[in-house]
Amino acid sequence: MKIIIRTFFKTLRTILGPVMLLKEKLTRPKGIVRSQAAQQSADLQCQDLTLYQYKTCPFCIKVRQEIARLSLNIKRIDAQPPGADRDELTLKGGQTKVPCLKITVASGNSQWLYDSTMITGYLRGRFAGSEPCSASLTTRDTA
């Protein structure tokens, strides 16, 4: 029975995954336009951010759409396949849950922000002028 259920969901992901990615591409919002200096400043700040994601996760798509809307160049890591990236998310972030935004602070430590709503709130607050949402930040020493 377990094999049948796994096969069903694997088939469902195989069929729906490309549809979800196509929908994301077709509905991608137009990014905000900044002055060259402001965009360079945003790009510099984005060097401290990494998004751990799964390509077809609806919550990850929500975050990627917000990143596109805010015209941000944030490094993205696919944490779905087993490997070093997934292990880092689990060991240093504390959970194998996506989306997760890794925020590296000046001291070299990292904060791990889970939940798509919290991540989009944080990004809006930091890059669109409203107050950042920081209630779900998980601080872990990763130095």
Image (cartoon, rainbow, N blue to C red):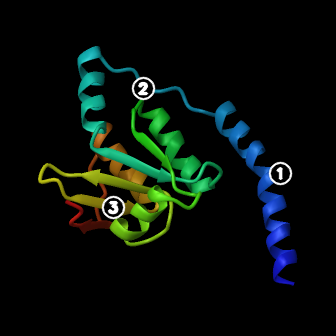
Distance between the alpha carbons at the discs numbered 2 and 1: 33 Å
Taking the spot 48% from the left edge, 41% from the top edge, the residue there is 66
Q: Quadrant of residue 107?
A: bottom left
Residue at left 33%, top 66%?
92
Horizontally, is 63 left or right of 137 in the view? right
Q: Which residue is mark 3?
A: 112
Q: Which residue is at a point 50% across and 66% down the rendered structure image?
A: 97
User: Of circles 2 and 3, which is in front?
Assistant: 3
Q: CA distance from mark 3 to mark 1?
A: 31 Å
For the N terminus, which image quadrant? bottom right
Res 32 label: 2
Query: Does any portion of residue 116 appear in the rendered image?
Result: no
Mark 2 vs 1: CB contact within 8 A: no
Q: Earlier in the sequence, mark 2 or mark 1?
A: 1
Disc marking residue 15? 1
Residue kind at label 2, given as amino acid type: Ile
Q: Nearer the viewer, residue 59 or 11?
A: 11
Return the disc, 3 or 1, that comes first in the chain's sequence.
1
